Amino acid sequence: MSVTVRVPAKVNVQLAVGAARPDGFHDLANVFLAVGLYDEVTVTPADELRVTCAGPDAAQVPLDRTNLAARAALALAGRRGIEPAVHLHIAKDIPVAGGMAGGSADGAGALLACDTLWGTDASSAELLDICAELGSDVPFGLVGGAALGTGRGEKLTVLEVGGAFHWVFAMADRGLSTPAVFQEFDRLAEGRAIPEPVACPDLLDALAKGDPDLLAASISNDLQPAALSLFPELAQTLAAGRGAGALTALVSGSGPTTAFLVRDPESAERVVQALRASGTCRTVRTASGPAPGATVL
Ligand SMILES: C[C@](O)(CO)[C@H](O)COP(=O)(O)OP(=O)(O)OC[C@H]1O[C@@H](n2ccc(N)nc2=O)[C@H](O)[C@@H]1O
Ligand SMILES: Nc1ncnc2c1ncn2[C@@H]1O[C@H](COP(=O)(O)OP(=O)(O)OP(=O)(O)O)[C@@H](O)[C@H]1O
């Protein structure tokens, strides 16, 4: 018997970053939107814990116990005193190290898949707790939809969304390390007072109304200057998408994937063509959100 769980990628429509905390993390006001690009995690009983991965970026995914899917299985098994004797297979469609929380999605997916396979029947509060131990973005993979993440991004409040938002994503030809981008944020912020991160009321209103123009006017990412400083060529990708009529263009989370909000699927196609023609990115994908969180198939 095996269990397969499908988990979405995310884009951050607001990422307000506070000062570095004593534990090295940053307090955030992190507005997540799940989008329809998915990884699938399949768990099957096996002699011992094993991870495999397939997909265009599979070569960059660690297959040892540092893989977030393996860490999720180990965490649940550890709490229940179960042998984590499973084969975890990741069918990977979310770009690796792209700022779309692909590894986090696999962690959330593996956790739900193991809970289902083992019949451990963890409450959603316990599942969210384990997710938060695994990483700041992992709880959102479980919940999906749209949510405000506070603390280091792990404390979630579900947000209402009044309609579908259409996106184009441009994947870069190399990744960016999340800790390196936060470090660059600290370096750029040296000597400046950093305000407390708070969710923007206009942005929450735009999500509730499902209004792409309002969302474009209020979208923001405090990590964008840091990502651009480490990866200056991203400015050309952003300009190419803007020039083709995207309502707004921004770096997704810690990057280097860039995200383009468009009004409808027809305008998405124009942005896709322009980005492909620009030669400034590796691949271009379309997806809309909100998408559901981790789901057993
Ligand atoms: C950039 C975002 O993707 C936006 O959603 C997240 O904030 C990052 O979440 P994540 O990849 O799950 O990050 P974690 O695995 O929890 O942390 C990785 C590293 O990122 C930095 N980090 C992460 C989250 C946070 N609120 N402050 C941080 O400074 C820390 O250096 C940390 O050691
Ligand atoms: N299941 C996994 N899939 C991809 N990467 C993983 C996984 N588990 C661990 N990793 C490690 O995590 C690193 C970051 O990968 P990931 O794809 O999650 O980045 P990301 O999308 O930028 O994350 P985020 O948006 O949460 O900051 C990879 O370079 C890899 O070493």
Image (cartoon, rainbow, N blue to C red):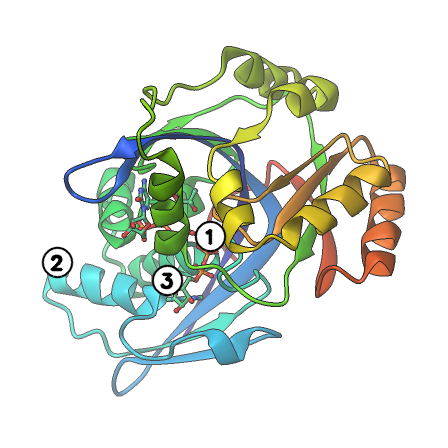
Q: Which mark is residue 246?
A: none
Kind of residue at badge 1: Ala
Q: Position of residue 209 (x, y in %)?
A: 65, 15
* Real-space Cα separation, disc 3 to disc 2, in angstroms: 15 Å
Mark 1 and mark 2 lie on one chain; the one further toward the N terminus is 2
Estimate the x, y position of residue 169 in percent, counting from the top left. Answer: 68, 50
Q: Which residue is mark 1?
A: 101
Residue at image x 65%, y 59%?
171
Reply above or below: 62 against 6: below
Image quarter (top left, top right, bottom left or bottom right) of the N terminus: bottom left
Quadrant of residue 177 in the image? Answer: bottom left
For label 1, count other residues whose C-alpha is less than 10 Å away and answer few (under 14), some (14-19) or many (20+). many
Rendering coords of residue 214 (x, y %): 68, 17
Tag 2 or tag 3, which sits nearer the N-term? Answer: 2
Specify whether 141 is left or right of 216: left
Residue 174 in which image quadrant: bottom right
Amino acid beneath label 2: Arg
Q: Residue at x 56, y 47 (%)?
A: 228
User: Which residue was labeled with disc 2?
Assistant: 79
Q: Is residue 282 visible from the viewing direction of this image?
A: yes
How crowded is the residue under tag 3: few (<14 C-alpha within 10 Å), some, or many (20+)?
many
Q: Secondary structure at mark 2?
A: helix
Question: Seen from this angle, which residue lies furthest front?
Answer: 191
Q: Is mark 1 within 8 Å of ligand 2?
A: yes
| Closer to the camera in the image, 244 or 136 | 244
Q: Position of residue 113 (x, y in %)?
A: 38, 61
